[in-house]
Amino acid sequence: MKKYRGFTTKQESQTRSAGFTLIELLVVIAIIGILSAVVLASLNTARSKGNDAAVMSNIDGIRTQAGIYSSTNGNYGTAGSGCGTAVGTPANLFGDQTVINQVTAVKKANSGGTVTCNVAANGAAYAVSAALVATPGTFYCVDSAGTATTTTSNTLSTGNTSC
C-alpha cells in the first residue's frame, strides 16, 4: 500500500482495526477473573448461612416432635445424654425415629459438628444444642422451657437440660 502525505489508503486502515489488541483482551480477562472471585466468595457465605438455617430448622423440628412425644408418653422418657442412632436407643425422646432423622439432618447440615442431646432424670425436661457453620464457635440451643437461643459456647454439659 502506498502512503500519501501521512495518510493510509482505505484498504490498509480497514485491515488494522479488525481485532482487539492483546492488552485489551488481558484487561477483559482480568476483570472477569476479579468478578468471578467476588461471586464465589459470596456464594460460600450464602451456603454457610443456608446450612445454619437448616440446623436451626431441624432443631426447631425436634422441639415440635418433643411436644408430640411428651403428649403421647407423659414425659420425655428416661434420663440420659446423647442423641439416638437407633429407634428406642436411648429410651427417650431422642430414640424416636423422627427425632433421629432430624438429628441426622442437623449433623449433615453442620458437617458432622457437635450435636448434644439431654433428658432430665425424671423425664420432665430436655435440651438439644448444635454447632452452627457460618460463625465457628456458635451453637443453637433449644430446651423444654421454650428457650431457643444462639450462644457462643455449648452450654449443654452432660445432664444439663437448660439453654
Image (cartoon, rainbow, N blue to C red):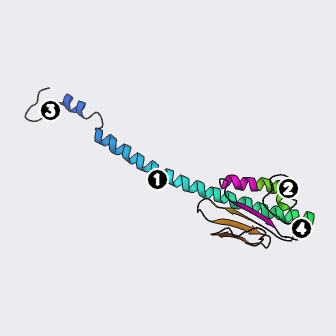
Q: Whole-Å distance between the Cαs marked 3 and 2? A: 90 Å
| Residue at image mark 4 | 75
Classed neighbour count for the residue bearing mark 1: other residues with Cα under 10 Å, few (<14), some (14–19), many (≥20)? few
**Which tag, 1 or 4, sits closer to the chain's start?**
1
Nearer to us of marks 2 and 4 is: 2
**Which tag, 2 or 1, sits closer to the chain's start?**
1
| Residue at image mark 3 | 8
Q: Whole-Å distance between the Cαs marked 1 and 3? A: 45 Å
Q: Whole-Å distance between the Cαs marked 2 and 4? A: 16 Å
The answer to whether 10 appears left or right of 51 in the picture is: left
Nearer to us of marks 3 and 2 is: 2
Nearer to us of marks 4 and 3 is: 4
Q: Is mark 1 on a helix, strand or loop?
A: helix
The answer to the question of whether label 4 and label 3 lie on touching residues, with beta carbons closer than 8 A, is no
Residue 3 in magenta? Answer: no
Front position in the image: 140 or 20: 140
Q: What element carries label 4?
A: loop
The amino acid sitting under disc 4 is Asn
**Which tag, 4 or 3, sits closer to the chain's start?**
3
Front position in the image: 16 or 162: 162
| Residue at image mark 1 | 38
Q: Is mark 2 on a helix, strand or loop?
A: loop
Nearer to us of marks 2 and 1 is: 2
The amino acid sitting under disc 3 is Thr
Residue 57 drawn at (x, y percent): 71, 60
Q: Is mark 3 on a helix, strand or loop?
A: loop
| Residue at image mark 2 | 89
Task: Tell me which corner region of the image, top left, top right, bottom left or bottom right, holds residue 14.
Answer: top left
Classed neighbour count for the residue bearing mark 4: other residues with Cα under 10 Å, few (<14), some (14–19), many (≥20)? many
Q: In this view, does 27 lie above or below 84?
A: above
The range drawn in magenta is 103-124
